[in-house]
Image (spheres, coloured by chain):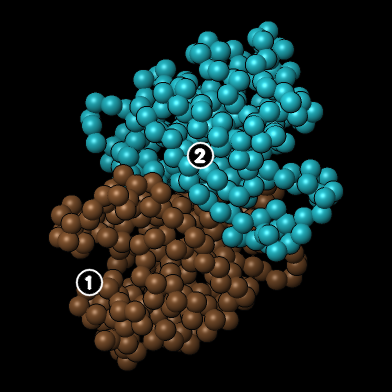
Chain colours: A cyan, B brown
């Protein structure tokens, strides 16, 4: 473990936001260790996108962590034994979107903290945003502050040193501001996948909520949209 | 999800402490969902013990969650690609015991929180103890308080309802008091495995630190030691 290099674990989903976060962490001089999760319900093309993004932005390493949350069962979304009716695929049946993961950011940050401890990294970056996704409790600044306080009581490194820092550089930015920031840092958004329903090659549907939000972001940022639509 | 049954997720390792916690949660009237982790470095007999304990104490369900922390690599303890020299097996080389798991209780509690969210459980039980294991930061009351505060900002259930409760009924008990408590509740400690080096049938070595601590606990509690020694 070097004393000269500042290491950071960066949560990377393959989407637009976390790609921007990785570029920002790199620009701050961190040696970045990108972490993605295969938790059973993702489109494979998203994880391939994460890999391309990590490489193109010069992350030191990209780790795909296999986290099978289906093991908890109990809901149609996480349990193979329960049939998901076709109509529920888009979450209309019960209001829970198909992308829902229980205690998501808590679980992801905890595994990031575990890897950070192994690496000797004191910084964790996560692309949460309380502007566009204000409905999620674990995207708010007060959650992040509480998480950081907990992390600094959880480990020897947190108590003895300067402490862990949970960095959320996007937390108060609009989608357009995020895109402007990333573009200035050279992020190739054509590599990222935001669509809820991409095809096997990661091309976007152009129709879902996530595609609409992304398209509006490029439009409002006055930056050409490099998204690969099918 | 029933409104009449209080559900709890109980972290269960197969050892003496968590078996006692499960018995205490059952005695409080909770419908208990026991959660164990297969994280790569455990003796299989410990997980079999957890299964026997869950069944004997009447847990509603026992889930073994496959959490392969070897994926983080970076240390001889979690990375198969790095040879562990024989001399380091007992941790003498670097002071890190072979049972070390990075950010352990943070990761375990986060997955317990995820399952609790799926189940509609507002209580989580964990057998941390700040008397016998005071060296671990994540066994102290201040860590647990910080974790609970974070959990209650992380989820809709935490914000809107009475909040999640992280229960640590053993936190200030000695090993002897734990054994007395569990014995009074009918825990069969012969089913549990505390040894760092049990044989395939879960029989204890009687020599390691954990065996010594356990033996002293029974002696001081003046309760016959039902441990199966080989």
In-image side of B142 versus A52 (left or right): left
- Which residue is found at the position 23% from the left and 32% from the top? A2
Q: Residue at x 76, y 59 (%)?
A: A83
Question: As displayed, is residue B108 above or below residue A51?
Answer: below
Q: Which secondary structure, mark 1?
A: helix
Residue beneath the point at 32% across and 53% down: B80
Q: Are marks 1 and 2 on the same chain?
A: no
Residue at image mark 1: B209
Residue that mark 2 sits on? A36
Q: Nearer the viewer, residue A6 or A229?
A: A229
Whole-percent x, y for residue B60 in the image: 62, 75
User: From mark 1 to mark 2, how far is it between C-alphas?
Assistant: 38 Å
Height in image: A193 above or below B39? above
Q: Position of residue B86 (x, y in %)?
A: 17, 61
Give the percent coordinates (x, y) of residue A6. 32, 27
Is residue A84 in view? yes
Is A211 situated left or right of A72 in this image? right
Circle 2 marks a residue in which chain?
A
Q: Position of residue B75 (x, y in %)?
A: 28, 48
């Amino acid at each position: 473990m070097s004393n000269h290099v500042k290491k950071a674990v960066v949560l990377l989903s393959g989407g637009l936001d976390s790609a921007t976060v990785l570029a920002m962490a790199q620009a701050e001089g961190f040696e970045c260790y990108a972490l993605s999760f295969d938790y059973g319900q993702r489109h494979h093309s998203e994880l391939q996108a994460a890999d391309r993004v990590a490489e193109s932005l010069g992350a030191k390493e990209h780790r795909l962590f296999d986290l099978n949350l289906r093991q908890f069962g109990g809901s149609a979304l996480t349990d193979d034994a329960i049939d998901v009716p076709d109509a529920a695929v888009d979450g209309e049946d019960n209001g829970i979107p198909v992308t829902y993961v229980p205690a998501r950011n808590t679980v992801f940050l905890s595994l990031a903290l575990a890897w950070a401890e192994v690496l000797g990294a004191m910084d964790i970056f996560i692309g949460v945003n309380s502007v566009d996704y204000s409905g999620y409790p674990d995207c708010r600044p007060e959650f992040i502050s509480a998480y950081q306080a907990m992390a600094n009581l959880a480990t020897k490194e947190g108590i003895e040193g300067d402490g862990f820092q949970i960095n959320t550089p996007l937390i108060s930015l609009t989608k357009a501001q995020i895109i402007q920031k990333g573009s200035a840092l050279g992020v190739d958004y054509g590599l990222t996948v935001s669509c809820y329903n991409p095809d096997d090659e990661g091309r976007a549907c152009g129709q879902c909520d996530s595609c609409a939000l992304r398209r509006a972001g490029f439009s409002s940022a006055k930056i050409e949209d490099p998204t690969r639509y099918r």
